[in-house]
Amino acid sequence: MKYIRYVYSLQEENFYQLLTEYTKGVEILNRKGDKVIFAVYEKLGHLEPLQVQEVHTKHPKSYLRTTRIKDFLIVPYGIKTIFINPGMAFGTGLHASTQICLLLIDEFFKKGWTAIDVGCGSGILSIVLKKCGAKQVLAIDIDEFAVKECKKNAKANNTPIKCIKAKPQDIKGNFDFLCANLEMDIFRKEMEHIKRLFKKRAVFSGIYGKDELDEFLQMLKDFSVVKIKKLKGWFGLVVER
């Protein structure tokens, strides 16, 4: 960020008189005899500046970092925080396929869309979708334990999400957006049911290596592939109808 700084000099008596009139604050740079050298960040119309300087500052986000002190976590304002119970359901945000989904959701999801998370696990992707402004989120999984974890994590994050035990073929209707972070074997069995669940855009992940990627692209040959992202050997894709 760039600011213009105006440097002025006034006799001490006049400087203190200025302080009673100027309410925005000044930066005292130096004192020379009975004179005060000071700076403000706008031009004072009745005075001639000694110097006009460009001052470059870093945005607070560039140096403020998330900090943990025992059980306290200090998080910069504006970062979407997600609380996940360290249970047994898949999805802590540490696996590359989950990270790919998070990055692609952040880039391609539109606020106000409805969304479905197929194979929700802990619910991390569903929670992110809701925090990104989803109008409605449905999270489904065939594992009853995962559904319980998803509900628990949704409550911890104060994100109203419907979490149910279901297969893709059990779901009636469709959604604007779909995310599915699944194993390749599951995609092979369920892709025809999964594809009908979204109207606009989908994020898929859980694809490992080029051979699986080539096979997966064949499953989606009727769709437009918008982006392919790779991380640690894992692939994620964004597709549109």
Image: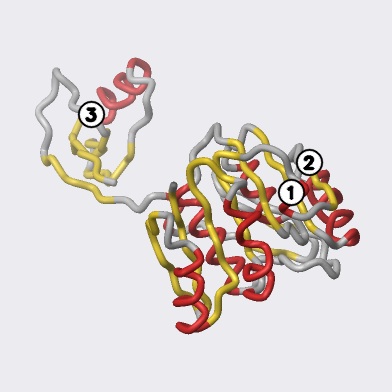
Q: Amino acid at mark 2?
A: Lys
Locate residue 61 relative to residue 139 in the image: left or right.
Answer: left
Image position, residue 168 (x, y; %) = 72, 53
Residue under label 3? 42
Image position, residue 88 (x, y; %) = 85, 70
Image position, residue 21 (x, y; %) = 33, 15
Viewer-closest of 81 and 131: 131
Pointer 2 with pointer 3, Cβ within 8 A: no
Pointer 1 with pointer 2, Cβ within 8 A: yes
Residue 131 picture quarter: top right
Of all residues, the one furthest to the top in this rendering is 21
Q: Does 174 sit above or below residue 182?
A: above
Locate residue 88 relative to residue 36 in the image: left or right.
Answer: right
Q: CA distance from mark 2 to mark 3?
A: 53 Å
Rendered image: mark on residue 139: 1
Query: Residue at 51% across / 71% down in the picture?
Result: 216
Q: CA distance from mark 1 to mark 3?
A: 53 Å
Q: Amino acid at mark 3?
A: Glu
Residue 101 picture quarter: bottom right
* Secondary element at image label 1: strand
Image position, residue 198 (x, y; %) = 57, 45
Residue under label 2? 162
Q: CA distance from mark 1 to mark 2?
A: 6 Å
